[in-house]
Image (cartoon, rainbow, N blue to C red):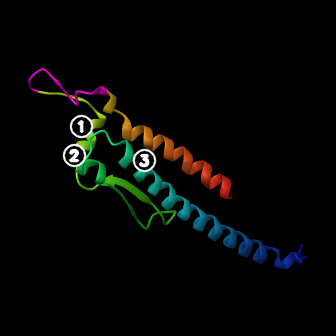
Amino acid sequence: MTRVRPEEFEKVLTKALAEYGDVVLEKAEQTTKQVSREAVRTLKSSAPAGGNYARGWSHKSQKGGPFKLSETVYNRTNYMLTHLLEEPHETGHGGHYPKNVNYTGTIARVEDEYTNKYMQEVISKL
């Protein structure tokens, strides 16, 4: 425990809060990268369409914004197919794409799962 004179209290408190903020930011950034990598692995293993679509899942870091960190999970090879698999469409011939309705919602389920995991991980590390 440190004793602080009243006239130094503001300076000491400001310094302590700044140090804590740096720790929080570092842990949040580590967790963001870790969880996005796990989400990519899950999407690759559970991708309804195999081949290039499954291998195309990736993530990228983006710096900037209020928290100085962001990770984007995306499909770099078949990004148009993600929409078709998530939202079934009628074809011009009276059919549906995709034919297997179990494909729908894969990305949304992974997003929900890893959003919750991210929040729990950040809270547990603080």
Q: Which is the main secondary structure of the residues drawn in magenta?
A: loop
Disc 2 designates what residue? 80
Disc 3 designates what residue? 42
Mark 2 neighbour class, 10 Å CA radius: few under 14, some 14 to 19, many 20 or more = few
Asked whether 60 falls inside the magenta stretch, the response is no
Q: Position of residue 82 (x, y in %)?
A: 27, 43
Which amino acid, mark 3?
Thr
Mark 1 neighbour class, 10 Å CA radius: few under 14, some 14 to 19, many 20 or more = some
Tell me the SS state at disc 1.
Answer: helix
Estimate the spatial distance between the alpha carbons at disc 1 and disc 3, rounded to whole Å. Answer: 19 Å
- Please report contact status of discs 1 and 2: CB closer than 8 Å, yes or no: yes
In which quadrant will I find the N terminus? bottom right
Estimate the spatial distance between the alpha carbons at disc 1 and disc 2, rounded to whole Å. Answer: 7 Å
On screen, residue 41 versus residue 66, left or right, reads left
Q: Nearer the viewer, residue 20 or 6?
A: 20
Give the quarter of the image for residue 99. top left
Disc 1 designates what residue? 84
Which residues, given as a range, are shown in magenta?
92-101
Q: Nearer the viewer, residue 57 or 45?
A: 45
Which amino acid, mark 1?
Leu
User: At x 74% / y 72%, what residue is drawn?
Assistant: 16
Which amino acid, mark 2?
Met
Tell me the SS state at disc 2.
Answer: helix
